[in-house]
Every structure is written in structure tokens, then in C-alpha cells.
Amino acid sequence: METPMTHLYDSLKTRLERHAQYRRTLRELRSMPLDVALDLDIDKGDAQRIATRAVYGQASA
């Protein structure tokens, strides 16, 4: 049986893991060479939106 503390811990752990993945994705997008970004039709100004959608499955507001 899952206790409230176990649920809280699991939820926090999941959120921290997803946020770490977001930061890694954002860092990779921002460090991408311009020619590669252009080949992939990625505007570097959209890095946050792309990272959010990739990790969380939704566009940022």
C-alpha cells in the first residue's frame, strides 16, 4: 500500500527527472550549430517551446 509520503516522494522524483531532461534538451538545442538548426528547420528562438513540447508533451503558454 502506498503511503502519502511515498506518493509525494515518487511525484517529486518524477518532476525532478523531467525537469532535468528539459534542461538537457534545452541546452542541446541552444548549443546546436546554426547550420544544423537551419537544416532541421529549427529557429533557435523557439528552443524553450521545443524543449517543453519534447519533454512535457505540450507547448508553453
Image (cartoon, rainbow, N blue to C red):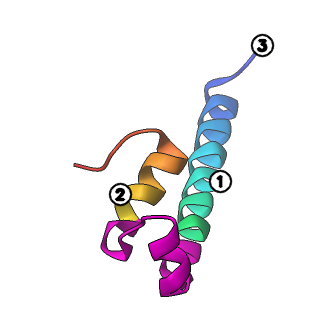
Callout 1: 10 Å neighbours few (<14), some, many (20+)? Answer: few
Report helix, strand or loop for mark 1. Answer: helix
Q: Amino acid at mark 1?
A: Glu
- Precedes in sequence: disc 3 or disc 2: 3
Residue 9 rendering spot, x and y as whole percentages: 66, 41
- Precedes in sequence: disc 1 or disc 3: 3
* Up-down relation of residue 6 to residue 34 (above or below): above
Which segment did they paint magenta? 27-47
Give the residue pinned by disc 3: 1
* Relative horizontal placement of residue 53, taking residue 5 as reference (left or right): left
Instruction: Measure how far apart labels 1 and 2 are at the Cα level.
Output: 18 Å
Q: Amino acid at mark 2?
A: Arg
Q: Is residue 28 magenta?
A: yes
* Relative horizontal placement of residue 6, taking residue 57 as reference (left or right): right
* Up-down relation of residue 28 to residue 5 (above or below): below
Q: Amino acid at mark 3?
A: Met
**The N terminus, quarter of image:** top right
Report helix, strand or loop for mark 3. Answer: loop
Give the residue pinned by disc 1: 17
